């Protein structure tokens, strides 16, 4: 993995998404500041969405937009061979099985997005 699929780039993307999600804008017609929750598509919680309910399409959703999930590693044994699995293995699994609620690595992370969808 290199380029846009490097861990430091994914971390920077998470930081940018957090800043964008926290952005507000004055809406003169409403007479108040509006946020992402006011305008986002939130299919699983449309009446009172939080930031995590918004359907944001991003590769970081395979990690539920969670830095801790991105940093996880685990020992995994495959027959007689033992190795370490990390975000690379999870990403490869999720790209091939995006509807999975738990990957087959020792990380056992969901491929579902933070908002609950694929």
Image (cartoon, grey):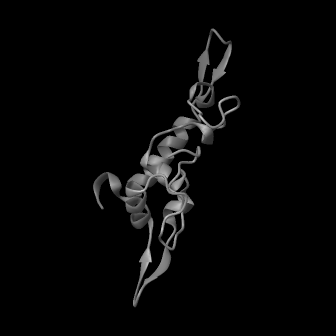
Give the percent coordinates (x, y) of residue 108: 54, 67
> Residue lying furthest right in this view?
48
Q: Is residue 100 left or right of residue 115?
A: left
Residue at horizontal 58%, vertical 46%? 116
Q: Is residue 85 left or right of residue 114?
A: left
Q: Quadrant of residue 91?
A: bottom left
Q: Is residue 83 left or right of residue 64?
A: left
> Residue lying furthest top in this view?
29
Does 104 appear above or below 12? below
Does 42 appear above or below 5? above
Q: Is residue 53 left or right of residue 65?
A: right
Give the percent coordinates (x, y) of residue 60: 46, 50
Residue at horizontal 41%, vertical 87%? 79
Q: How many marks?
A: 0
Front-most of residues 72 and 117 = 117
Does 89 appear above or below 62? below
Q: Quadrant of the N terminus?
A: bottom left
Residue at horizontal 42%, vertical 53%? 10
Give the percent coordinates (x, y) of residue 3: 29, 54
Give the percent coordinates (x, y) of residue 65: 53, 50
> Residue lying furthest bottom in this view?
80
Residue at horizontal 59%, vertical 27%? 24
Front-most of residues 77 and 15 = 77
């Amino acid at each position: 993995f290199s380029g846009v699929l490097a861990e430091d780039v994914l971390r920077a993307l998470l930081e940018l998404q957090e800043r964008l999600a926290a952005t507000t804008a004055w809406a003169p017609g409403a007479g108040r500041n509006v946020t992402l929750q006011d305008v986002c598509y939130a299919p699983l919680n449309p009446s009172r969405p939080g930031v995590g309910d918004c359907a944001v399409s991003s590769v970081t959703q395979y990690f539920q937009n969670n830095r801790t999930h991105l940093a996880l590693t685990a020992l995994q044994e495959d027959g007689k061979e033992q190795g370490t699995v990390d975000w690379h293995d999870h990403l490869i699994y999720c790209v091939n099985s995006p509807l999975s609620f738990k990957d087959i690595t020792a990380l056992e992370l969901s491929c579902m997005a933070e908002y609950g969808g694929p």
